[in-house]
């Protein structure tokens, strides 16, 4: 979802209406609303009301780390809990987060 919003932003086509997001990603509106709400609460996107209802990134996608997105997903409860992880799994999780922190959302958009 955030990728679709960021691509539209980079192409000066933001804000993106929720209906467009649901259509492009073929996801139910109720599920999209929950995810969009979590992304707004995580301060990765903002909801607009004028001139149309839609969503856009709160900052340039170059300044949104993939680790920020992963953290938002984890906080929303869409990721598994890390409370009972073994030390090895915890090391893997930390390594993954470190790798994601090195990449911005813009780097994966393929938009000129």
Image (spheres, rainbow, N blue to C red):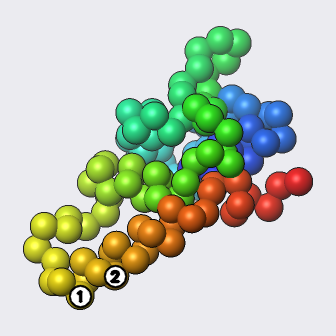
Number of numbered discs visible in the structure rendering: 2
- One can see residue 23 in this view: no
| Quadrant in the rendering for residue 60 | top right
Residues packed near mark 1 inside 10 Å, few (<14), some (14 to 19) or many (20 plus): few
Q: Nearer the viewer, residue 27 or 2?
A: 2
Q: CA distance from mark 2 to mark 1?
A: 6 Å
- The secondary element bearing badge 1 is classed as helix
Measured as percent of width and height from the top left, residue 84 is found at: 11, 74
| Quadrant in the rendering for residue 12 | top right
Q: According to the image, label 1 marks what residue? A: 88
> As drawn, which residue projects farthest toward the right?
112
Q: Relative to residue 9, is residue 77 drawn left or right?
A: left
In this rendering, the answer to whether 69 lies above or below 110 is: above
Quadrant position of the C terminus in the picture? bottom right
What residue lies at 39% left-to-right and 49% top-to-bottom?
72
- The secondary element bearing badge 2 is classed as helix
What numbered label is drawn on residue 71? none
> Is the C-beta separation of discs 2 and 1 under 8 Å?
yes
What numbered label is drawn on residue 92? 2
Q: Nearer the viewer, residue 34 or 84?
A: 84
In this rendering, the answer to whether 10 lies above or below 82 is: above
> As drawn, which residue projects farthest toward the bottom?
88
């Amino acid at each position: 979802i955030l990728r679709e919003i960021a691509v539209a932003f980079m192409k000066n086509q933001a804000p993106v209406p929720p209906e467009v997001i649901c259509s492009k990603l073929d996801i139910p509106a109720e599920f999209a609303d929950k995810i969009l709400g979590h992304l707004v609460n995580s301060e990765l996107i903002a909801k607009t009301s004028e001139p149309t209802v839609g969503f856009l990134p709160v900052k340039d996608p170059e300044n949104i780390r993939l680790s920020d997105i992963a953290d938002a997903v984890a906080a929303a409860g869409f990721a598994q809990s890390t409370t009972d992880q073994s030390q090895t799994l915890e090391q893997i999780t930390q390594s993954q987060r470190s790798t994601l922190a090195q990449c911005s959302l813009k780097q994966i958009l393929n938009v000129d």
